[in-house]
Amino acid sequence: MASESEKTKIVTTFLKDSPPGEFNNVLKDCREVVGDDSIFQECLPICLHDYNTEQLTVVMDGTNPVIISKYTEQSAQEFIDPVNKKVVTFDHLSKQITSSQPLSSGLPGNDSLRQALQKKLDNYAKEFYPKGAAIVMPKDNNTYTIIISAADFKVAQFSNGKWRSEWTITVGSKVTCEGRIRVQVHYFEDANIQMHTDTKKKVTCNGGSEDQIAQNVIKEIKNIEDTFHAELDKIFATLSDNCLKALRRQLPISRQKINWANWKGHKMMK
């Protein structure tokens, strides 16, 4: 029988690996299996914090979206909203903002450059990530982090998905954009199918005025993310010839061949 420390380690792994939007479901199942709530009293606060920051959880402060992340974190429960220059207090369990107040000191870095980046980013996110949020968080005069987080939770249709991209912008004689893109999709109607992608990219672009820097940076990010989307489309287009065939028997129980030419009609692929 597993010791209490081993159970805690196993539960922690399951909780932190919960698919997007399904933490509470996994927590409920773990509680039913383990049956010892003292384990959760110890590990749950840490798991919730790590999960919410890693998932770039988007919450609303009134009508303003706030991204919970390591980049915006001031303390375990306090996070910066750089767009509105506030500090929000976030309840990791309820996923609600309990209070907000103005920043006691200004943001680091060049605020006019941050605003220029945010303006271009807003236009980009509005067109391509309408269900998400995007912010620019400054670190210093030369370093800024762009965070994009978008989710599509369809529990009634047994599918959840999330897009996360993080870009570190370093301004010098040239501007360097170094980023990470993660996409996670979970389909769970009479199945348990997950897709995880995690890729890193790096590109440089020209500097110039603050507006030119912002325009060049967002243009490069858009090009990279467009290419990444196209690569995913190619993968999905070949599923019928590779993955789906490998997952199924040559003949189903009906003893009739599957018409793979019409694979898009399969419910799993919708």
Image (cartoon, helix red, strand yellow):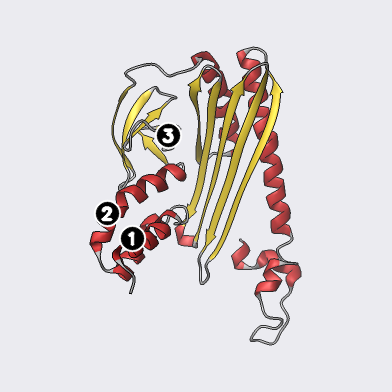
**Which quarter shows the N terminus?**
bottom left
- Determine which residue is flagged by label 3: 65
Amino acid type at circle 1 is: Thr
Q: Nearer the viewer, residue 250 or 63?
A: 250
Amino acid type at circle 2 is: Glu
Whole-percent x and y of residue 72?
42, 31
In this picture, residue 61 sits left or right of residue 220: left
Q: Nearer the viewer, mark 2 or mark 3?
A: 2
Among the two numbered marks 2 and 3 on one chain, the one whose residue lies closer to the N terminus: 2
Residue found 71% across the figure and 47% down from its top: 230
Say if 170 sits above or below 95 in the image.
Answer: above
**Which quarter shows the C terminus?**
bottom right
Mark sitting on residue 42: 2
Q: Nearer the viewer, residue 170 or 253?
A: 170
Quadrant housing residue 209:
top right
Q: Nearer the viewer, mark 3 or mark 1?
A: 1
Q: CA distance from mark 2 to mark 1?
A: 8 Å
Residue found 52% across the figure and 19% down from its top: 115
Mark sitting on residue 8: 1
Q: Residue furthest left?
A: 38
In this picture, residue 231 sits left or right of residue 93: right
Rate crowding at label 2 as few (under 14), some (14 to 19) or many (20 or more) other CA atoms within 10 Å: few
Quadrant housing residue 33:
bottom left
Q: Are marks 2 and 1 in contact (CB under 8 Å)?
A: yes
Amino acid type at circle 3 is: Pro
Q: CA distance from mark 3 to mark 1?
A: 33 Å
Q: Are marks 3 and 1 in contact (CB under 8 Å)?
A: no
Q: Nearer the viewer, residue 58 or 172?
A: 172
Q: CA distance from mark 2 to mark 3?
A: 30 Å
Whole-percent x and y of residue 148?
53, 37
